[in-house]
Image (tube, rainbow, N blue to C red):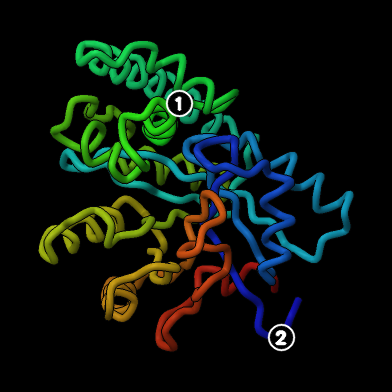
Amino acid sequence: MPRFPIYDLHSHTLASDGMLTPAQLVARAVEMRVSVLAITDHDTTAGLEEAHQAIIQQALPLRLVNGVEISTVWENFDIHIVGLGIDPQSPAMIALLADQAGRRQIRAEEIARRLEKHQIPDALAGAKAFAGDAGITRAHFARYLVEIGKAPNMAQVFKKYLAKGKTGYVPPQWCTISDAVEAIHLAGGQAVLAHPARYDLSPKWLRRLIIDFKQAGGEAIEVAQCQQAPDERTQLARYAEEYQLLASQGSDFHFPCAWLELGRRLSLPDKVIPVWQDWFK
């Protein structure tokens, strides 16, 4: 382990809505000088085995943490809970992710139905072509709509078609935060509140979310990310201290781009306790 290792504990592969294979992701992590990487695909652990095999076969200087990012619903908000250090063979985790896959498929079919009503046919097949064997996400629909010329980029697709209140938006029916945290714990992992500042919550509502997460047994919140508003990292660190939560960090990497990269600008403020403090003792 390097003297000053870089931890990136939030990343995605083709197993969900990322654009790199698990083998490509771990190779890129090494290129970016990441020392410890967690693969946290949305509601699936399907990419973990390939990633572990790639590290062994290529003798990569990288520690891989088994992870997952579980979609939940809290007060009508789509909230993500990352599980770190999980056993992907845990019966509780397998059962929860199977339920999530069913919910995801039902949602995808309804998104496609709504888009078709607005003269966008074949959206389900188009999204499936991008998803491959992975569960279909809104990002896959967005890529399809860009491909057929409905918008110049994915951000515009979400703004026009897939964001809350738009034509193709379907309210999620995910599990609860408590369900997610329980499955993570039964799988031997730690539960982390992912990117808390991205939910467009007022300070009062964000505190409510953190309190409910803590009461459900959550251990940590993501404090550091590649892209953050001024003072966001400092404020999240204050929440970690105030609510006695560990601190995590991660790029939320999906694909190579100029503004979001594995390991980039990831460091924790001095006063917080890292989620990995006891991992390698």
Residue at 39% x, 12% y: name it.
122
Amino acid type, mark 1: Ile
Query: Can you tell which quarter of the image residue 70 is in?
Result: top left
Tell me the mark number nearer the camera, choosing from 1 and 2.
1
Residue at 10% x, 63% y: name it.
204
Residue at 49% x, 26% y: name it.
135
Q: Position of residue 205 (x, y in %)?
A: 13, 58
Q: Nearer the viewer, residue 41 or 21?
A: 21
Q: Nearer the viewer, residue 153 or 78?
A: 153
Q: CA distance from mark 1 to mark 2?
A: 40 Å
- Horizontal side, residue 23 vs residue 262: left or right: right
Q: Position of residue 234 (x, y in %)?
A: 31, 81
Q: Secondary structure at mark 2?
A: loop
- Horizontal side, residue 72 vs residue 90: left or right: left
Q: Which mark is residue 136?
A: 1
Q: Nearer the viewer, residue 148 or 158?
A: 148
Mark 2 or mark 1, which is nearer the start of the sequence? 2
Q: Secondary structure at mark 1?
A: loop
Label 2 sits on residue: 3
Q: Residues within 10 Å of mark 1 (few under 14, many from 20)?
A: many
Q: Position of residue 25 (x, y in %)?
A: 67, 51
